[in-house]
Amino acid sequence: MTDYNKQAVSFWFDTLAEKIQPRPILSEDIQVDVAIIGAGFTGLWTAYYLNKQQPDLRIAIIESETAGFGASGRNGGWLMGALAGETKYLAGLPEPERQAAYQLIFSIIDEVKQVLAAENIDCDLHHGGSVYAAARYPEQLAFQQSELKHLYQAGLSEDDYRWLNKAELDATVRMRNGMGAIYTPHCAAINPAKLVRGLAECLERKGVSIYEQSAVTHVGHKQLQTAQGSVRADVIVPATEGFADELMGLKRYVLPIQSLIVATEPLTESKWDEIGLADRPTFSDAGRMATYGQRSADGRIIFGARGGYIFGGKVRHQFALSDPAFREREQILRDLFPSLASVNVTHGWGGTLGMARNFTPFAVFDANTGIASAGGYGGEGVGAANLFGRTLADMILQKETQLTAMPWAFTQATHKSALKRWEPEPCRWLTYQTLLNIFSWEEELYNKGKAPAWLRKSTGAVCDKLALLMA
């Protein structure tokens, strides 16, 4: 059974062929064209596309820990051709432009595949799509069918999202009381630590400098400072996402949320025959705890769910497996797959992601100050960071492209009116804690199966209203 005395460590880091050795710190004063703060997906992809378009650019990446230390190495490994809030962003576009924008978003997976092939990066990518199931309790069925209707109303088709009936769902993955599901081809499973570390090594081969264990202590006009060095740059890119601070006032727009994940021991073939997932689609159910899972390349189930928020927007990267929050995720996982009742959980870890108000991620560049940034991915940053890294690269190079014309691309002048700020404390903490507690209570109520119909219905209606507070 689970060893709750074990320290929580990201499973993905345990899959790396070699132990992580920090790169040199920034110990001198340097001058470059572009300085990027943070060696996660946003920073690395931005550097990659800047270098690809203009190889003579001098680019330095300044990382406070090691490449992939933050959310980029701690997520569930979903490479999605999707964006949080995409239907809101694209709803106002004329039909031809809206469809073109969707195709741009859907192409994220193929774009990453091309980079992996070109740069010889192996991150266990498997393109099996994603299954958003209605399972466990009947309220999920109505929710998923309503969600599919909403997607079709937004102009999407069965080529992008289609309904699986019970038999089709069972042929794909067998969950307790599986009733049906939305299937989309626009998702792939990856090992995110292998991807982020591979990107960093690729950039070094191309001449991009990466300094690690070099926390930025101050940002001034086209200059940043660390404990032992400094960087002068025409463009500075705070690519900190969930670790957003005051470098560009981004903390007002990005809420740092913790998400927690567990990994089982490798399952036997007989166990996989019971569960399915033969083509390794990522999967979730329609519970309000926002679950997400995948079958890893070595035959484990990786499974996570919505986490917490710390007062004041503090980030968190240290967890103990004895934390009750991990047991809650185990319980949901075993509820989805009862055959896992006796399977050991070997890893439990967490990370901090960035949530934008209204679930609308953004890319911002101010040509006057030379400050550029992107974030607020809402847990969908593995794929979104690639798209937004490309967007930032075009904006920094001051090119007018399809990417820079997208409604998520802002200048400093426009983002102040377009991006919505989060409420001040204690409103943020109180609201999030209230939502999390009520959603947990709703989950327990539905799962008991004994609550009267009127209570289940009224609870769902109240939770629907409360969920709008985050929208």
Image (cartoon, grey):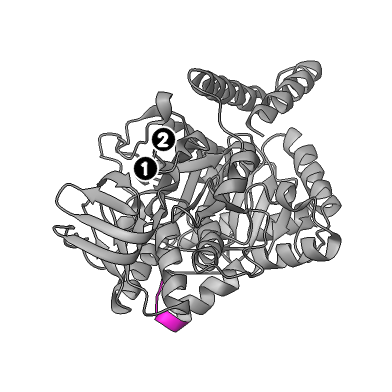
Mark 2: secondary structure: helix
- Which of the pair 307/334 is nearer the observer? 307
Q: Which residue is mark 1?
A: 348
- Which of the pair 200/227 is nearer the observer? 227
Residue at 17% across / 57% down in the picture?
25
Is the residue under label 1 in contact with that under label 2 (CB below 8 Å)? yes
Quarter of the view holding residue 169: bottom right
Residue at 83% across / 66% down in the picture?
96
Q: Main secondary structure of the magenta part?
A: loop
Q: Report whether 367 appears left or right of 246.
A: right
Mark 1: secondary structure: strand
Residue 438 on the magenta span: no
Amino acid marked by disc 2: Phe
- Which of the pair 199/408 is nearer the observer? 408
Camera sees residue 225: yes
Q: Which residues are magenta?
A: 118-122
Query: Gap in Å between the C-alphas at discs 2 and 1?
Result: 7 Å
Identify whether 44 is placed above or below 7. below
Mark drawn on residue 442: none
Residue at 43% across / 43% down in the picture?
248
Q: Is disc 1 surrounded by few (<14), some (14 to 19) or many (20+) residues within 10 Å?
A: many
Q: Report whether 17 appears left or right of 397.
A: left
Q: Earlier in the sequence, mark 2 or mark 1?
A: 2
Measured as percent of width and height from the top left, residue 415 is found at 59, 45
Amino acid marked by disc 1: Gly
Measured as percent of width and height from the top left, residue 343 is found at 42, 46
Q: Is disc 2 surrounded by few (<14), some (14 to 19) or many (20+) residues within 10 Å?
A: many
